[in-house]
Amino acid sequence: MALCFSFPPDFLSPPNFQPLLQNCTNSQHLTQIHAKIIRSKLSTNPILAAQLLRLYSSFGNLNYASSIFHRIQSPSTFSWNLIIRAHTINSSSSKSLILYNLMICAGVPPDKFTFPFVIKACAASSAVEKGKEVHASVIKSGFYCKDLFVKNTLLDMYLKCGSLESARKVFDEIPVKNVVSWTTMVSGLVGFGELDCARELFDQMPVRNVVSWTAMINGYVSNGRPQEAFELFSQMQVEGVKPNEFTLVSLLRACTELGSLSLGAWVHEYALSNGFKLDVYLGTALLDMYSKCGSLEEAIKVFHMMERRSLATWNSMISSLGVHGCGDVALGIFEEMIKEKVMPDAITFVGVLSACLQTQRVDEGINYFKFMIEECGIVPILEHYVCMFELWSRAKDNVQTISDEGQSFVQMTETEMFEESLYASLPR
């Protein structure tokens, strides 16, 4: 519902704008309030500017957020924190680091709220050397010894940047670790493939939450030890820790690794009996498990039961149908996907072209290939070319089965240009 701005003049003071900003729930309402603030000549008010900056960043509108920030005369640490945070949370980490550098050059002192977002930006940019520089500033400022959140963020940054030695040092320097400290280190060790070290640390944890258990279970699955994942899940149940959907997805991946349909069906039943809904993440994992464990019928049931589907869900269903020899149905699912205005990606078309190849639909395959390039703007990858080569070789053997347009397309694309494109797709 649109907001009405027929306010008396004395209502338009900064304190009276603040409730409007606090209750703002979408970008459209925010721009309306912002326009009124500008007309009321209050756009330079530092309190309102800070609130506008925070809201625009939360709605992902970095252009407006940056515009407001650059209009603030002598921005405070608080304002710098807001704009750095805005870029960090909106996947503009390199700009966050530039802003941090400008903040330091301007002589504005960072505080304990500045550092976590700068460190996160270092992690997102894999800028470990900049991270070490910020780490030194944290120590110099005195926050390293007294702020656990900053230490945990540094720990996460070093692990994500691949610097295990620095991460171990930070972890060892935390005198009183919380569950986040322990879990971050366990997850990091898992990521480095040091599974036994991760388990040893996991067993030392004074307190473990569902995130800790799931990190260790997922570690076993990701490192080809699915049986141990289920053993740990049994221990988790004994200790009375309830799993979340991420735990169950890891278990479903373990079922796929084991090739155990019965175990996968048990996880499905466990999910339903414990109140889990077939959302996008869990539903797609179930679909994938059933397909890979040989039960296409159950995979299709799960697909149709899902109220919401992601691109990954559609891709999994199309590929599964193709693998099980149901190319016609796979193409039907793809058409349904297009009708629902879900934009396909390169993986989608691998499944689609494979289905055309399986059902010997040469004309359709050519049309889908052209649609992929011309309408979806997708650059063909090696797998697409492999499918098309096979389709075209069949077309050349059975020219009478394809249209004149299809024959023309075959003749045009089997030239040197196509061979060069294929060569460019090969790994070097």
Image (spheres, rainbow, N blue to C red):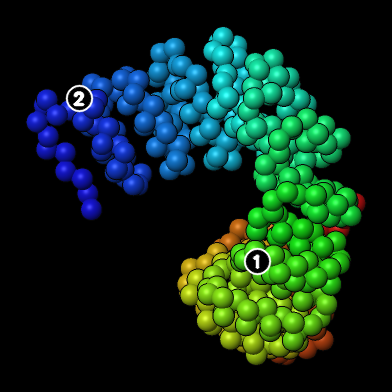
x and y percent of residue 51 in the render?
36, 31
Q: Residue at x 58, y 62 (%)?
A: 376
x and y percent of residue 236 in the render?
71, 66
Question: Which element is circle 1 on?
Answer: loop
**Rendered image: mark on residue 301:** none
Between 344 and 239, the one nearer to me in the picture: 239
**Disc 2 from disc 1: Cα separation:** 54 Å
Q: Which residue is drawn at 75% across and 49% down?
A: 205
* Farthest residue, direction left: 8
Badge 1: how crowded within 10 Å, few (<14), some, or many (20+)? few
Question: Which element is circle 2 on?
Answer: loop
Looking at the rendering, which quadrant does residue 132 occupy? top right
x and y percent of residue 319 in the render?
70, 77
The residue to which callout 1 is attached is 240
- Specify whether 182 is left or right of 258: left
- Specify whether 79 is left or right of 31: right
Q: What residue type is labelled 2?
A: Ser
Looking at the rendering, which quadrant does residue 425 occupy? bottom right
Looking at the rendering, which quadrant does residue 10 occupy? top left
Q: Which of marks 2 and 1 is in front?
A: 1
The residue to which callout 2 is attached is 13
Q: What residue type is labelled 1?
A: Gly
x and y percent of residue 312 in the render?
63, 67
Between 220 and 90, the one nearer to me in the picture: 220
Between 286 and 214, the one nearer to me in the picture: 214
Q: Residue at x 22, y 49 (%)?
A: 2
Q: Residue at x 61, y 58 (%)?
A: 377
